């Protein structure tokens, strides 16, 4: 698209991402740049330029350019700018009865690329977050093995490590949308999602170290050291493929809320299987049918049956801008539609975008890198003429699987389910440019 034909379009952010005029976020308003590239503008500073002291604007020299800055090392562990203080994980009010068993959602609408910052990666706990002394922490591997072993963190750190970029998505992501549009913004519809570079030891390495029974072993039980003693069954073929015992996240030790000092990472599988604060692995010949895989994290079907062990997170995508709660300010402006796509079965092959509720589709540009079982960023140029629109995206992964419409998913799964909602998300833009969560 020739950007000279259209003025850049501005998007006012959802209310929770906004700051007062005295502390605006630089991410508050996305504007289109020339030649089809997107640029980040000074959000509310543009929308309310009259509130800015003219002495701060060119050709004047602002005060921060006239004084000695803070010394090196004044913040021994770096933190975001105070102008970014509203870009945080958020808890949905009333979602759970206690905060110890709840969720804090990733602000997907404010992120760039595919990597989720450690401080913004979603949290899901079942009995609060333990603070574990890494020197006292132990991992035991037992069951159908030649020799049961107990490992210290120092032992695990001695094994050769690998680093891989993978997403983690809670099986209940988008759960509130099964019946009807329930929440206003993408942070709450899709924010139980994060993607990071994980560093650790392949589980297959430690299974070889204990000499697991290759003939009898079919499953592994993973247990966490939290007060819930959360346990999950993992098929042995997953364990021998790409499962990691992860201790690193984006170049540092994983955070306490992500399982410090050690967690399981099962790429492409619902997040609960990536057991945090990992303390025990038992090798067995059958699944354990524990509480979190029978009473919870099973799919209630229309005929009343319950489907267990639906591990894989199927292909899914969502537009993060424009998205719910945002406001398009410029009719006749150029906008860049952008979002995220992912699949638990491998790489994203294509993402299609519709602005008319799925009647017509255009193929979006996939932004490198495109990795297996990782988030993939997509974008599409769009000129908004000011009329109402229905924005959708659909993901096609490398297996050929096509992300379903909500109607198609309900035909198979009904409306009483909680988990594995990978339906196409619709954002409605009204004639005023306001963006709403709807279903079509």
Image (cartoon, helix red, strand yellow):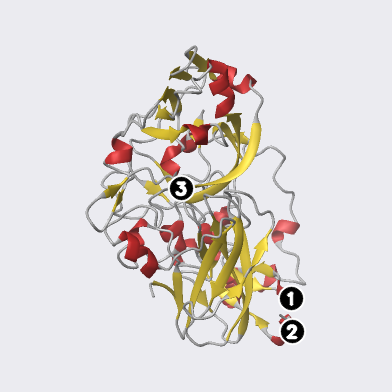
Local SS, label 3 = loop
In the picture, the disc for residue 143 is none
In percent of width and height, residue 135 lies at: 52, 18
Q: Measuring from the top left, give residue 209's x and y in whole percent.
A: 57, 17
Q: Of discs 3 and 1, which sits in the foreground? A: 3
Residue 260 seen from this side: no
Q: Residue, x 46% and y 55% (percent of image)? A: 191
Q: Which residue is denoted by mark 1 in the rendering?
A: 34
In space, the residues marked 3 and 2 are separated at their CA atoms by 45 Å
Extreme right residue here? 59
Secondary element under disc 2, as helix, strand or loop, is helix
382 horizontally vs 313: left or right? right
Depth check, front residue: 180 or 213: 213
Q: Which mark is residue 312?
A: 3
- The residue beneath circle 2 is 4
Residue at horizontal 57 percent and vertical 87 percent from the top = 385
Work out how far the residue at label 1 is from the one at label 2, CA to CA, in angstroms. Answer: 7 Å
Q: Earlier in the sequence, mark 1 or mark 2?
A: 2
Q: Are marks 1 and 2 in contact (CB under 8 Å)?
A: yes
């Amino acid at each position: 698209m020739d950007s000279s034909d259209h003025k850049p379009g501005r998007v006012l952010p959802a209310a929770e991402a906004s700051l007062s005029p005295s502390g605006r976020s630089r991410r508050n308003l996305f504007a289109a740049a020339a030649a089809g590239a997107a640029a980040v503008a000074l959000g509310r500073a543009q929308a309310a330029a009259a509130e800015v002291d003219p002495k701060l604007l060119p050709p004047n020299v602002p005060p921060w350019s006239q004084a000695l800055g803070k010394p090196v090392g004044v913040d021994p562990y770096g933190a975001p700018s105070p102008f970014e203080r509203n870009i945080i994980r958020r808890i949905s009010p009333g979602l759970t009865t206690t905060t110890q068993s709840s969720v804090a959602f990733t602000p997907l609408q404010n992120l760039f690329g595919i990597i989720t910052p450690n401080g913004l990666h979603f949290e899901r706990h079942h009995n609060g977050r333990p603070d574990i002394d890494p020197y006292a922490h132990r991992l035991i591997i037992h069951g159908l093995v030649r020799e049961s072993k107990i490992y210290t963190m120092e032992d695990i750190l001695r094994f050769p490590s690998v680093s891989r970029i993978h997403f983690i998505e809670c099986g209940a992501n988008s759960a509130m949308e099964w019946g009807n549009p329930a929440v206003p913004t993408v942070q709450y519809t899709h924010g139980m999602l994060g993607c990071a570079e994980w560093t650790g030891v392949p589980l297959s390495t430690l299974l070889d170290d204990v000499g697991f029974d290759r003939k009898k072993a079919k499953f592994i039980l993973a247990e966490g050291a939290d007060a819930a003693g959360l346990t999950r069954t993992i098929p042995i073929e997953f364990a021998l493929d790409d499962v990691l015992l992860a201790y690193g996240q984006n170049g540092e030790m994983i955070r306490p809320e992500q399982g410090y000092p050690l967690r399981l990472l099962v790429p492409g599988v619902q997040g609960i299987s990536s057991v945090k604060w990992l303390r025990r692995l038992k090798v067995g010949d059958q699944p354990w049918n524990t509480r979190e895989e029978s009473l919870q994290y099973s799919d209630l079907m229309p005929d009343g049956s319950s489907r267990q062990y639906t591990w894989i997170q199927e292909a899914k995508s969502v537009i993060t801008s424009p998205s719910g709660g945002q406001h398009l300010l410029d009719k006749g402006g150029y906008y860049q539609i952008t979002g995220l796509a992912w699949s638990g079965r491998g790489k994203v092959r294509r993402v299609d975008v519709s602005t008319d509720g799925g009647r017509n589709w255009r193929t979006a540009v996939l932004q490198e890198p495109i990795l297996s079982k990782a988030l993939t960023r997509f974008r599409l140029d769009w000129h908004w003429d000011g009329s109402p629109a229905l924005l959708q995206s659909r993901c096609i992964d490398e297996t050929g699987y096509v992300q379903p419409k909500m109607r198609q998913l309900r035909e198979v799964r009904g409306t009483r389910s909680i988990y594995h909602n990978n339906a196409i998300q619709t954002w409605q833009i009204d004639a005023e440019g306001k963006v709403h969560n709807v279903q079509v």
